[in-house]
């Protein structure tokens, strides 16, 4: 008994492939693997879409970092705090005036010493405030510089991919080389590390703010410290929680570094345990 193969394996509906066939006309017989074959055109369009999505995500991340970095840079408090490291010239002037008046007054038999400008040291509080705030400012500037550099790298990468090639096959080879370069040089990891630098700048600024408020207003310092501890705790929990719960939606690029550290730590522990046997 003969079986009609068309009933078991019906031919695909040509209407389903109409748009694809119009966009990518089929190659002539024997030209399916030629340098300008359809497969290379399909490959170029597909990887271009993937690259656009990847670059768009990276650009958005860098834009957010740059906007956040501009906030502390626009605050001039850290730039004015250096005055705490300098002598208080108004106080020295006031003391000098008092000393001059005392010398001119005949009721005083012993002259008062004139305040000296030598060996004037800043208080430990002023040193800590300036150290923390200027360290925060330095990290923010470094982070802004690196963000701008990375954006230029990504623009140059996209520009290279848009350049014409002698054939679709050569374009595919060139794209593969440049795309592998992004992974080889760890551009994605580097971009995710920029947020870690920004975290450091933020917490340094907050610690300096607490030191600044400690002697200025204890109540305000306590409130700021409570908010800092609360936000810092929530931040740390949101970062580390996905390590133990895979379905946790608070995953960030920093989690990749944490997983690498966790895997490397387990590897080193296993090596030490094996060699100790």
Image (spheres, helix red, strand yellow):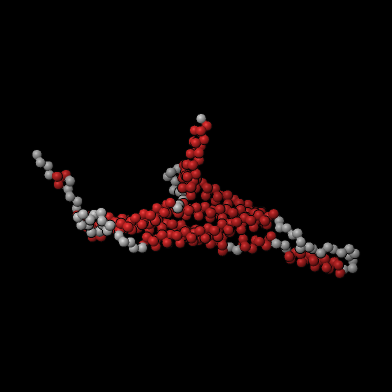
Say which quadrant the N terminus sits in: top left
Q: How many marks?
A: 0
Which residue is depicted at the point 45% across and 43% down?
A: 245
One can see residue 70 in this view: yes
Which residue is depicted at the point 52% across and 60% down?
A: 145
Which residue is depicted at the point 52% across and 49% down?
A: 235
Query: Residue 111 location, x and y as percent?
Result: 87, 64
Q: Vertically, is 178 above or below 97? A: above
- Picture quarter containing residue 60? bottom left
Image-based side of 156 in relation to 25, left or right? right
Q: Nearer the viewer, residue 33 or 65?
A: 33
Query: Residue 201 location, x and y as percent?
Result: 56, 55
One can see residue 250 in this view: no
| Residue with the most extreme left position | 1
Image-based side of 110 in relation to 39, left or right? right
Image-based side of 220 in relation to 237, left or right? right
Which residue is depicted at the point 76% across and 63% down?
A: 117
Query: Residue 116 location, x and y as percent?
Result: 78, 63
Q: Vertically, is 268 above or below 54? A: above
Q: Vertically, is 238 above or below 48? A: above
Image-based side of 106 in relation to 149, left or right? right
- Picture quarter containing residue 3? top left
| Residue with the most extreme bottom position | 104
Query: Residue 219 location, x and y as percent?
Result: 65, 54
Q: Nearer the viewer, residue 105 or 4?
A: 4
| Residue with the most extreme top position | 277
């Amino acid at each position: 008994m003969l079986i009609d193969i068309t009933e078991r394996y019906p031919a695909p509906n040509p209407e389903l492939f109409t748009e694809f066939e119009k966009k990518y006309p089929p190659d002539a017989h024997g030209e399916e693997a030629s340098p300008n074959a359809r497969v290379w055109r399909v490959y170029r369009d597909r990887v271009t879409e993937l690259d656009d999505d990847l670059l768009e995500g990276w650009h958005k991340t860098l834009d957010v970092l740059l906007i956040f970095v501009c906030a502390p840079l626009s605050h001039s408090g850290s730039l004015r705090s250096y005055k705490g490291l300098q002598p208080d010239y108004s106080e020295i002037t006031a003391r000098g005036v008092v000393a001059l008046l005392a010398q001119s007054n005949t009721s005083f038999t012993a002259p008062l010493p004139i305040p000296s400008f030598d060996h004037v040291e800043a208080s430990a509080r002023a040193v800590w405030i300036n150290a923390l705030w200027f360290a925060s400012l330095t990290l923010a500037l470094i982070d802004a510089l690196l963000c701008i550099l990375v954006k230029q790298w990504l623009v140059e990468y996209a520009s290279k991919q848009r350049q014409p090639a002698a054939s679709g096959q050569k374009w595919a080879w060139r794209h593969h080389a440049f795309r592998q370069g992004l992974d080889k040089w760890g551009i994605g990891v580097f971009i995710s590390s920029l947020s870690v630098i920004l975290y450091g700048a933020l917490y340094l600024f907050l610690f300096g703010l607490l030191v600044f408020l400690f002697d200025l207003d204890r109540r305000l310092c306590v409130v700021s410290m409570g908010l800092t501890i609360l936000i810092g705790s929530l931040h740390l929990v949101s970062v580390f929680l996905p390590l133990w719960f895979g379905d946790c939606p608070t995953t960030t690029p920093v989690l990749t570094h944490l997983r690498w550290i966790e895997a490397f730590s387990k590897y080193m522990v296993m090596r030490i345990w094996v060699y100790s046997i």
